Amino acid sequence: PEVIPVDIWSKKKYITRPIKNFFNIFKIQIGSARRLSFLDFNKNIKISKYKLLLKSNKEVVNHSLSDVYDYFIVGSDQVWNPEFAGFGFYFLDFVKDNRKKIAFSASIGVTDISKEFANKMQLNLKKFNAVSVREKQANDLITSLTGRDDITTLVDPTMMIEAEEWNELARKPKQYNGENFILNYFLGEQSEERRKIINDFAKKKGYMVINILDKDDPFYASGPAEFLWLEKNAKLICTDSFHSSVFGILFNTPFLVFDREDTSKNMSSRLDNLLDIFGLKDRKFIGKELTENRLDIDYSKAHERLAFEKKRGVDFLINAIGGVEE
């Protein structure tokens, strides 16, 4: 498989960017150590020599790619979130042969969408050869919009890869000095109350706290490889992030999920689904204090369910690709 990069055409200039613009999302500065860490990790991704050309309003200009590949797969993280999506390439509208269109664990990420975006989803998703999504709520919504009865709910693609394979990509941060630590990975803002709860527990246990997304933290320069190592080796992960929770499960690391504090849209459906599927609802943090028992977790049943879900994902892809080849 290859990842297709995107060229955006604006005033006769071309701006190349990856389909998922990590540099924008994390506000990574050109030449920074953090940016270099991300670029280094990107060497693990096979990038297509072809590019998708878009106008500055995200309208697909060229459709020539449609004949280059046997099938096109779009998925996972919030690709159909109306806050970021709605772009032609996320609905694969540049692919002329609808049999080639496959959605694998696509995520909407929010529970409320506008009528305009709902109409766009209805128009485009009826054309897909096969559709799987990551959240039950997304399944219900798309089934209602399209009238399809074949929408499948699957786990996130990151969970289709063995923990050992992820571990091969992990790299210990240069800043790490051997101390036990709690990993804070919050995409939303952290209130002072929340910081105090975590810091008080860390002090009690003699742990340091790593705030990987805090620009003032020495570990801010970490890229995806260092993030994987920190997820695997933390004594506890405190997070409001879906994927941080996923890697907690994969690496058998105790984690706690906190509600995101600064979002105007309800984005909890992704995490609620994850905890529900794997029988880990007790990992949701409720209360005013962290206690010792939060470091204990039994992942045996979760990993039994993971094996089952991985097989479902493989079966979906085999059937979807088979539908293209017929």
Image (spheres, rainbow, N blue to C red):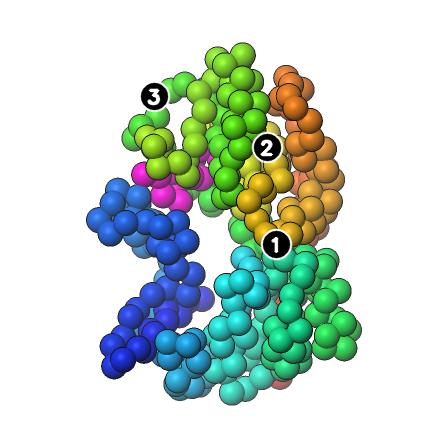
**Label 3, residues with CA under 10 Å away: few <14, some 14-19, many ≥20:** few
Residue on which disc 1 sits: 265
The residue closer to the viewer here, 161 or 17, is: 17
**Label 1, residues with CA under 10 Å away: few <14, some 14-19, many ≥20:** few
Quadrant location of the C terminus in the rendered image:
bottom right
Q: CA distance from mark 1 to mark 2?
A: 24 Å
Quadrant location of the N terminus in the rendered image:
bottom left
Q: Nearer the viewer, mark 1 or mark 2?
A: 1
Q: Nearer the viewer, mark 3 or mark 1?
A: 1
- Inspect the image, locate mark 3, and give the three-letter code of the amino acid beneath it: Asn
Q: Is residue 291 magenta?
A: no
Q: CA distance from mark 3 to mark 1?
A: 39 Å
Q: Secondary structure at mark 1?
A: loop
Residue on which disc 3 sits: 177
Q: Is residue 223 magenta?
A: yes
Q: Secondary structure at mark 2?
A: strand
Tell me which residue sits at (35%, 37%) in the image: 215
Image-quadrant location for residue 154: bottom right
Magenta span of residues: 221-232
x%, y% of residue 221? Answer: 32, 38
Predominant SS along the magenta part: helix
Tell me which residue sits at (56%, 27%) in the image: 193
